[in-house]
Image: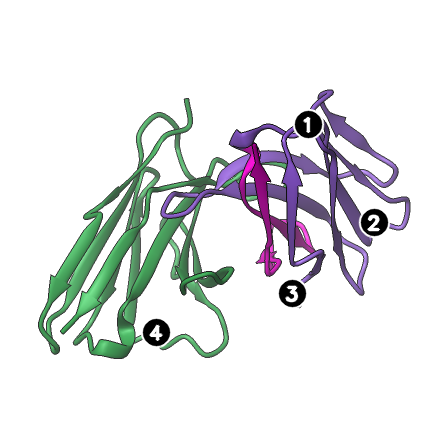
Amino acid sequence: GAVVSQHPSRVICKSGTSVKIECRSLDFQATTMFWYRQFPKKSLMLMATSNEGSKATYEQGVEKDKFLINHASLTLSTLTVTSAHPEDSSFYICSAREDAAGNQPQHFGDGTRLSIL
Amino acid sequence: QQPVQSPQAVILREGEDAVINCSSSKALYSVHWYRQKHGEAPVFLMILLKGGEQKGHEKISASFNEKKQQSSLYLTASQLSYSGTYFCGTEINYGQNFVFGPGTRLSVLP
């Protein structure tokens, strides 16, 4: 159980393109979803936390207009990187948690490797 | 505030033990432990919520000290499959401010 599906797994696109990444909880309802960015050999950096039906809470330094997050249902959250540039190239990974409390684990998707040319 | 993890890296021979520490300057609501293999998603290991708590099984277990500022992950009789980067994640408040530590890279050699 507790499977999170993330698509696409890899994206290569030209500078200026907008890219949408989907994160779905397949067998549970995710009250909270998290979006992370990870650089090579580094830790996961939390970008934003989203609760179903609410606006996402962004971490300091993360541009809201650049990284649009929508959590329209209890099983789907999307991250859209708008007008992507080479510096946005990274590994983006989502996770989902069944409730908002800290006593539930985060279940991770397999990540999306984004390369902007 | 990001928790501190130590050591940064450790190399073991199969069958040896390891301890990975995670500490915070503030009392924590919870500590989570995850393992990530190269190019893969992190995999959940365990959560600790109570001061003085110990949980896990014989091979992989963790503790949370009474002050709830430090947690340790114990890897006993390590196997090749234990190789990866171990992250602790901490929450200071109920459902808020979740932060991953910098990670500890564990390599188990035959």
Identified by mark 2, the residue type is Lys
Q: What residue sits right under mark 3 in the picture?
A: B2
Mark 4 lies on a secondary structure that is: loop
Q: Residues within 10 Å of mark 4 (few under 14, many from 20)?
A: some
Q: Is residue A31 left or right of residue A26?
A: right
The residue under label 1 is B15
The amino acid on which the numbered mark 3 sits, given as a three-letter code, is Gln
Q: For this rendering, which residue is in front, A6 or B94?
A: A6
Q: How is the image coloured?
A: by chain
Q: Which mark is residue A67?
A: none
Mark 1 to mark 2 CA distance (whole Å): 30 Å
Instruction: Decide: few, some or many residues near mark 1? Use Cα within 10 Å; few <14, some 14-19, many ≥20.
Output: some
**Chain A is shown in which shade?**
green
What span is in magenta?
B82-110
Q: Which residue is mark 2?
A: B68
Residue A97 lies in the magenta-colored region: no
Mark 1 vs mark 3: same chain? Answer: yes
How far from the left and from the top, in percent, is residue B32?
64, 43
Q: Chain of mark 4?
A: A
Q: Quadrant of the N terminus of chain A?
A: top left
